[in-house]
């Protein structure tokens, strides 16, 4: 079960990337929300997380990340649009760095917004 979930998690995004690049010539996620491979990726991620054993020392980190998920969800599209306008995809390896950059910057902005009164109610789950 664990091997199947890890394979689903690793192989499905690669297939989805090649379909997006070769068929649709567009890598933005809003075109693929109803795609079967997105469902397979979600299932692989869920099964992988379900089979993990988490010790008590990691609970604090999981909590800190989980309260910021709504903020990241709201902010990430703006970060992606700014990246595309300022940098674009002309840099070698930009497609590999793009998701990591988007996630890190979105988490940082969400952490900053969590410290502002009244705004933290919007970005907190």
Image (spheres, helix red, strand yellow):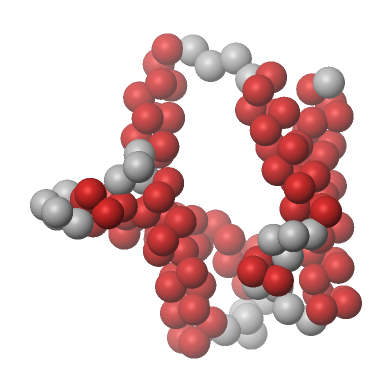
Q: Quadrant of residue 21?
A: bottom right
Residue 48: x and y in percent read 70, 29
Measuring 79% from the left and 31% from the top, which residue is drawn there? 5
Q: Quadrant of residue 113?
A: bottom left
Residue 2: x and y in percent read 79, 22
Measuring 65% from the left and 66% from the top, which residue is drawn there? 29
- As rendered, which of 28 and 85 lies closer to the eye? 28
Lateral position of residue 69 relative to residue 8, left or right: left
Residue 27: x and y in percent read 70, 73
Lateral position of residue 109 relative to residue 9, left or right: left
**Quarter the N terminus occupies:** top right
**Quarter the C terminus occupies:** top left
Given the current orientation, which residue lies at the most extreme front position? 34
One can see residue 13 in this view: no
One can see residue 38 in this view: yes
Measuring 43% from the left and 73% from the top, which residue is drawn there? 78
* Total numbered circles: 0
Q: Quadrant of residue 89?
A: bottom right
Given the current orientation, which residue lies at the most extreme left position? 117
Measuring 41% from the left and 21% from the top, which residue is drawn there? 59
Above or below: residue 95 compared with residue 69: below
Residue 14: x and y in percent read 81, 56
Above or below: residue 56 compared with residue 12: above
- As rendered, which of 92 and 5 lies closer to the eye? 5
């Amino acid at each position: 079960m664990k091997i199947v979930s890890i394979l689903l998690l690793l192989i499905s995004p690669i297939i989805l990337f090649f379909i997006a690049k070769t068929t649709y010539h567009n890598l933005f996620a809003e075109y693929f929300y109803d795609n079967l491979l997105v469902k397979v990726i979600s299932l692989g991620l869920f099964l992988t997380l379900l089979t993990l054993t988490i010790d008590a020392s990691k609970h604090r980190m999981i909590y800190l990340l989980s309260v910021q998920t709504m903020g990241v969800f709201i902010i990430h599209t703006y970060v992606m649009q700014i990246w595309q306008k300022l940098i674009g995809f002309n840099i070698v390896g930009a497609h590999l760095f793009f998701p990591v950059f988007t996630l890190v910057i979105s988490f940082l902005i969400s952490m900053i917004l969590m410290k502002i009164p009244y705004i933290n109610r919007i970005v907190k789950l």
